Image: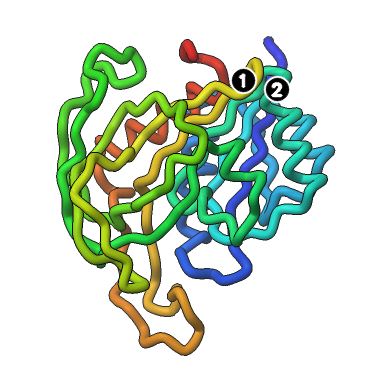
Amino acid sequence: MPRPLVAALVCGSPHRNHDFDWARLQLAQALYGAHGIRTDCYNDYEDSAGILGADLLVSYTSQVPVSDKAGTTIRRFLDRGGRWFALHASNSVAGNQAMPRILGTRFISHPKYMTFPVKVTRPEEPLLQGIGNFEVPDELYCIEDVTKDLDVLLHTRWGGEAFGDVQFEEADRPMLYRRAVGDGGVLYLALGHANRPYDKPFPDASDQSDYRGPWGLPVFQELVKRGVEWAAQRRPF
């Protein structure tokens, strides 16, 4: 029997502004369902030995402080051929300057939770074979392209007002992209919001509705499944 792979699953936030318990369960289940993968769970990126000892990295985080040592560790992991499947708020990085240059993007803001269309940018892409355009209930993430080298695979088009009174011009906005880093790379999926009434952006904010986002949609579940397979190097780069 071949040696099982080891996944480092980083899921959490000091602000608890998403339902990280739900996301952790769903991602752990996806990793388990991929077979032949053992999963170690972390709340942040500070266990350098754990990340460097892993075969793949999967994250669902938000505003997690990342030390210089941890940032260097992630870069080493990717440089030597590791792959990182990052979801949703993983690029909301609490002012860190190194992480956006690794991930390729930085979260800026999003409008109110809503249903919006997602389009396939690259229909010929093997990773998206059999997946067509779809609609999704979620937070529409507006992100800054930091490295200008994103291979965009899914996108939506939107413009308007987002939280923080930020105005965005109408433009195509990446929802799934891939980026090479060293001998490895990053696959980032902007979709995936979930919150319970008490999972809110600020402790003194009013309770919000319970949102599961796209997690119950077969198309999203398939994207997560393929993201795990890609990170495990069971799919071509």
Residue depicted at 29% across the width and 21% down the height: 128
- Say which element carries label 1: strand
Q: Position of residue 114 (x, y in %)?
A: 20, 60
Q: Which residue is mark 1?
A: 184
Front residue of 109 and 202 = 109
- Asked if marks 2 and 1 touch (Cβ < 8 Å), the reply is yes
Please, is residue 167 above or below residue 84 in the view? below
Q: Which residue is mark 2?
A: 79
Q: Position of residue 179 (x, y in %)?
A: 50, 26
Residue depicted at 33% across the width and 31% down the height: 222
Residue depicted at 46% across the width and 64% down the height: 19
Please state which amino acid type lies under the numbered disc 1: Gly
Say left or right for 123 vs 153: left
Please, is residue 91 above or below residue 194 in the view? above
Disc 1 crowd, CA 10 A, few/some/many (<14, 14-19, 20+): many
Please, is residue 107 above or below residue 126 in the view? below
Q: Is residue 179 visible?
A: yes
Q: Position of residue 51 (x, y in %)?
A: 74, 37
Residue depicted at 77% across the width and 45% down the height: 70
Front residue of 137 and 2 = 137
Q: Quadrant of residue 56?
A: top right
Front residue of 204 and 148 = 148
Say left or right for 192 vs 122: right
Q: Is residue 25 visible?
A: no
Please, is residue 66 above or below residue 209 in the view? above
Q: Quadrant of residue 129?
A: top left
Q: Quadrant of residue 76?
A: top right
Please state which amino acid type lies under the numbered disc 2: Asp
